[in-house]
Image (cartoon, grey):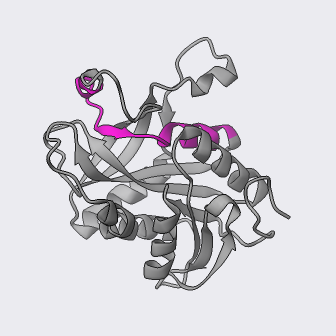
Amino acid sequence: MGTPHINANNGDFAKVVLMPGDPVRAKWIADTFLHDYKEVTNVRGILGFTGYTKNGKRISVMASGMGMPSIGIYSHELFTGYGVEVIIRVGTCGTYQPYIKLEDVLICTAASTDSNWMSQFHLNGTYSATADFDLALAAYEEAKKSGIRYHGGNILAADIFYDPDPETWKKWANLGVMGVEMESYSLYVNAARLGKKALCLLTVTDSFIDHSTKLTAEQRAYGLSKMIELAIATAERFC
């Protein structure tokens, strides 16, 4: 079978896919949280795996790369070419709010953006990209049971990582936006357009309020266990 960017065979992917940005993190998730898994795709170094959780539920994990164009391509091909019904992004972010601390988990019920992603649809208004309600509710219920620190709300999906204006983030913060990442908006739009389900879960690795506090690159790649456990518990409800 295969698509332009995925070389898996028909049936290689489960109905539910966890999607980190980093291929190294995808491999770590498979190694740490799945058993009897196999690599199903590796085009351009974007790794994907399918295996079983400790409760015997079949799920997949595949990297998305960085940015909305990248996750836009991979999520579209998974949804349309491989019968995937649910994608849960598991990523990292920087926080805009003082009450959100490093390693807190964000359940992103909506996504704002500075991107022109929606220009392709020629709408005469502004589209609000949102998570699937059932997925978000399941993540909320699982987070409450787990006792982890979590927050729900709006996230900014940005096209710019190195913003030349160091004050831009404050405008979003004043609207209650929790923080910033780079993928959720296009994932939510793709899911909505194709009648699928999507959710973005994030671990806070940086703070725009205190730039001296951040997780290391190694912690970003191999840590984040609380979020992955939450994502798997949520995913198992939809397998």
Q: Nearer the viewer, residue 83 or 24?
A: 24
Q: Residue at x 27, y 60 (%)?
A: 216
Q: Nearer the viewer, residue 216 or 40?
A: 216
Q: Is residue 96 left or right of residue 30?
A: left
Query: In the image, which residues are magenta?
Result: 169-193
Residue 222 at x, y percent in the picture: 37, 70
Q: Nearer the viewer, residue 90 or 54?
A: 90
Identity of the residue furthest to the bottom in this view: 36
Q: Quadrant of residue 113?
A: top left
Residue 51 at x, y percent in the picture: 59, 80
Q: Residue at x 50, y 33 (%)?
A: 129
Q: Residue at x 46, y 85 (%)?
A: 54
Q: Quadrant of the N terminus?
A: bottom right
Answer above or below: position of 159 versus 219.
above
Q: Is residue 60 magenta?
A: no
Q: Residue at x 65, y 51 (%)?
A: 74
Identity of the residue furthest to the right in this view: 1
Instruction: Report the predominant secondary structure element of the magenta stretch.
Output: helix
